[in-house]
Amino acid sequence: MGAAPGRHYYVGRTTVGVGVNDPGLLVLVSLLEGPRHGYSISDDIQATVGDRPGPGTLYGAISRLERTGLIRSTAGEGRRKPYELTDAGLAEVRRQVAALEAVTETARGRLQARFS
């Protein structure tokens, strides 16, 4: 489901901290390609999951990630404030991806057992 022009959809936050709709994880994944400013991160999230996070969701996630040392802001031009991953942020992406892979493997096995 794509966002209508001028309309924002909020990307939901999972209760377990792992999930493809976790805004923090989506920001971290976006920054794997290098520094980006907020609007570019939002565009990348939309291209990745099909929905654009609302500004409160996006900047709330960015603020939490910056506060916990997983990302940092870099020098930018004008109002654009680029963010980049820290070493801790890269380690967190790896941890989250491993957790998602474990869940995916378990789910595939159970689906196969149930519907084969």
Image (cartoon, rainbow, N blue to C red):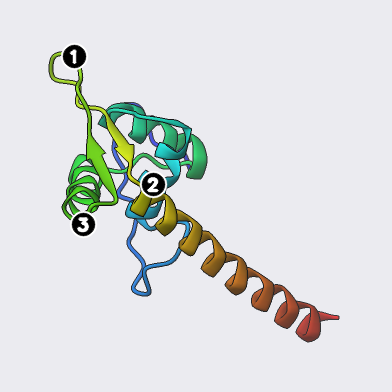
Residue type for callout 2: Leu
Q: What is the secondary structure assignment of the residue under circle 2? A: helix
Residue in the picture at 37% in, 58% down: 22
Mark count: 3
Measure how far apart labels 2 and 3 are at the Cα level.
Answer: 13 Å
Identified by mark 1, the residue type is Glu
What residue does disc 2 label?
A: 28
Picture disc at residue 77: 1
Q: How many residues crowd around disc 2 within 10 Å: few (fewer than 14), some, or many (20 or more)?
A: many
Outermost residue to the bottom: 114
Q: Which mark is residue 68?
A: 3
- Does residue 102 sit above or below 24 in this rendering? below
Secondary-structure class at tag 3: loop
Left or right placement of residue 80 versus residue 28 in this view: left
Mark found first going from the N terminus, 2 or 1: 2
Whether residue 21 is visible: no
Which quadrant of the structure image shows residue 103?
bottom right
Q: Residue 5 in the image: x percent, y percent?
A: 35, 26
Q: Which mark is residue 45?
A: none
Q: Is residue 66 visible?
A: yes
Residue under the point 79% across and 78% down: 112
Looking at the image, residue 49 sits to the left or right of residue 22; the answer is right
Q: Disc 2 or 3, which lies upstream in sequence?
A: 2
**Which of the two discs, 2 and 3, sits closer to the camera?**
3
Q: Residue furthest right?
A: 116
Q: Nearer the viewer, residue 15 or 2?
A: 15
Rendered-image quadrant of the C terminus = bottom right
Of the residues under marks 3 and 1, which one precedes in the sequence?
3
- Please report the residue visible at 34 percent of the width from the left and 35 percent of the height from the top: 42
